[in-house]
Amino acid sequence: MRTAAVIYHKNVHNYPPYWIEMCVESIQKQTYSQFDVFEVDYGGGGTQIYPNSIFSSEELPTHAHAHNYLLDKAFFWGYDYVFNCNVDDYYHHERFEKQLVYAEKKYDVISSNFYNVDENNKIKDVMTMHDKNIIQEANKDSNIIAHPVVCYSKHFWTTCSRLNPEEIPRDDFELWKRSYEKYKFIILPEFLLYYRVHSKKVCGLKSNEEKIHSSAGNPNTITEEQKLIHDAAREEWLKKN
């Protein structure tokens, strides 16, 4: 099975450098390592953040155009599954390995539970979505698929309707709603994404995930003990990296 990760960005210099470093290192240190990385600077600025990526610099109107551009390229080049990655977020080191278990089972869209973190990497919310019914939540206008941690199948991408830039900031949610009945979706119970909540998200508005995930119900309450465990794990991660 051929796999790739995709990274798309614009004006990445607006982010603190350590955000980018955390994202890159969390991809580099995946326990599954047999993947290539496709990257585009869709502002056309020529900034490459991932060493040895298959890089291009193209002026594209929106993040949706950039996302479609990279996935089209990766799947055209013969890759079977693609991991979507956001430069301002970071990932559990077993993310790719855990998701590929379900790729082998022919799932088309593989997401996971996730943590919300603030601009200083402090975990703020534990977002548990795997035990919810995806279609029932969509009918309540709740998006419980975290796009920054989605793994796509070639089957899905080459037959679906892709992200529609005119639907930003709900572009991913609208794509899921058009696809639920046709493809195999799953949300893994593991927490594989650290989703950074901040004012500079790529769409330039309050992020789609912030708005729609919040409508899926309140996140799990973090006990003081859990918070200490999460913060200790974060500090240990930072020491190693």
Image (tube, rainbow, N blue to C red):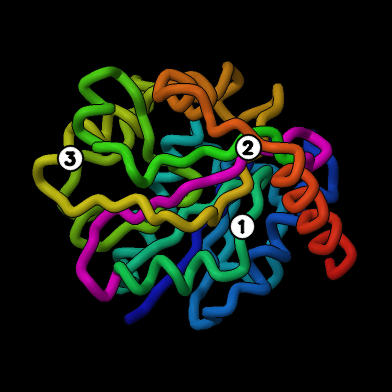
60 shown above or below 240: above
Judged from the image, the secondary structure of the residue bearing numbered disc 2 is strand
Judged from the image, the secondary structure of the residue bearing numbered disc 3 is helix
34 sits to left or right of 183: right
Q: Quadrant of the C terminus?
A: bottom right
Q: Which residue is mark 2?
A: 116
Tell me how far mark 1 sits from mark 3, CA to CA. Answer: 26 Å
Q: Residue at x 49, y 82 (%)?
A: 34
Asked whether the beta carbons under mark 1 and mark 3 sit within 8 Å of each other, the answer is no
What residue span does the magenta drawing correspond to? 103-122
Tell me how far mark 3 sits from mark 2, CA to CA. Answer: 26 Å
Q: Quadrant of residue 232?
A: bottom right
Q: What amino acid type is highlighted by mark number 3?
A: Ser
Q: Which residue is mark 1?
A: 91
Q: Quadrant of the N terminus?
A: bottom left
Q: Nearer the viewer, residue 206 or 79?
A: 206
Q: Position of residue 202 (x, y in %)?
A: 59, 31
Q: Residue at x 39, y 56 (%)?
A: 188
Q: What amino acid type is highlighted by mark number 2?
A: Asn
Q: Which residue is mark 3?
A: 179
Q: What amino acid type is highlighted by mark number 1?
A: Tyr
